[in-house]
Amino acid sequence: MTNGDFERILPPTEWSTSALVRSRDSDTGLAGTYLETYLENGFLLLQNTVFEFALAQEADEAGSTKPKVARTYTEFPSDDYTQDDFWSNIGAAGNLFGVFLAVALVYPFATVVRMLVSEKEAKIREGMKMMALSDTAFWSSWMILFFVINFIQTILIYVVGASLFEYSDGGLIFALFLFFLMASTALAFALAACFSRSMTAAILSSVFYITGYALYEGVWMNTVSTGAKLAACLHPVTCFTLATVPLAEYEEGGVGITSDTINSSEQNNFTFGDALGMLIADIFIWYGPPKTNDKR
């Protein structure tokens, strides 16, 4: 940019600090940086002349020898760039973290489905209905039980894995795991309404649960629209794994998921906030079918 007879060269912000002391940037081929301009445009000479004159005046008044002034320059000190390589080491954008957790939860998920179907096989519910137990009270009792279990599990996961989320807001990470576990439980409720035999329900529900990661593999790319990703988030495993993408992005950069980054992503069209919202929606969506479609 120019101002009258003076030309100013503003360096690109992506340059490193060391680029400021090079006479020519080897990558861009620009003729000089603003530091070079400062050294060669005459201002430094004028500034040094004024300083030497002022020092000479002070030295004469004090009756001492005029001091010699050396002109030097150095880079402005700055912290080294840091990067957390854990997330990049467990897969592209940390996506393997989602499948690790999904595999770990397959058995508990199948157990919930089997418990619900076994209760139906044993006709226990019919006996309780004869004693005026309402469907709302019945399903609410199950949900409260599993909420307590999931809450305890979330605390354990958070405590054990706290070092993995060093830069993120602890409350947001806690919410992610709690909502994921509750959404998985609600999905188990919905699947239990589709079966009448507990063993069949346990096997098929396990397969359905783990296919959530396969669904993720089909939608994680940036070429897939945000709307398609939100639709895929109806499966809790898919939604959780998609949430690990912006989580890995910000953790790797030493920023983490906070109130400032929850609704943004520099590399993807799906944010951590989108995932949290869909997990909450999944809880209500999947909790509905058992109460409405399982009138046995």
Image (spheres, rainbow, N blue to C red):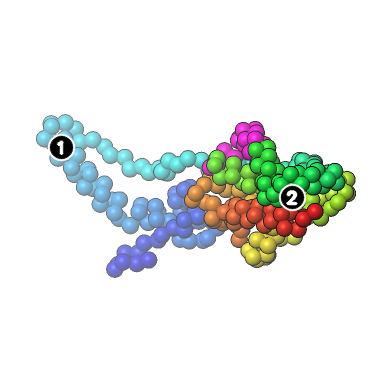
Image quadrant in which you'd find residue 57:
top left
Residue at left 46%, top 54%? Answer: 23
Q: Is any part of residue 139 visible from this angle?
A: no
Q: Residue furthest front?
A: 131
Whether 271 is drawn above or below 7: the answer is above
Circles 1 and 2 in contact, beta carbons < 8 Å: no
Asked whether residue 62 is drawn in magenta, I would say no
- Element type at marker 1? helix
The amino acid type found where label 1 is placed reads Glu
The reply, left or right, for residue 258 in relation to residue 289 is left
Mark closest to the chain's N terminus, 1 or 2: 1
Residue at left 79%, top 44%? Answer: 127
Q: How dense is the environment of label 2, judged by Cα within 10 Å: few (below 14), some, or many (20 and up)?
A: many
Q: Whole-Å distance between the Cαs marked 1 and 2?
A: 87 Å
Residue at left 25%, top 52%? Answer: 46
Residue at left 52%, top 60%? Answer: 28
- Element type at marker 2? helix
Whether 294 is drawn above or below 97: the answer is below
Asked whether residue 165 is drawn in magenta, I would say yes
The amino acid type found where label 2 is placed reads Phe
Residue 6's x, y, as percent? Answer: 31, 64
Give the residue pinned by disc 1: 58
Q: Which mark is residue 189?
A: 2
Residue 159's x, y, as percent? Answer: 62, 33
- Number of marks in the rendered image: 2
Say which quadrant the N terminus sits in: bottom left
Q: Which residues are magenta?
A: 150-169
- Near-viewer residue (69 or 141): 141
Q: How dense is the environment of label 1, judged by Cα within 10 Å: few (below 14), some, or many (20 and up)?
A: some
Whether 114 is drawn above or below 272: the answer is above
Residue 82's x, y, as percent? Answer: 55, 41
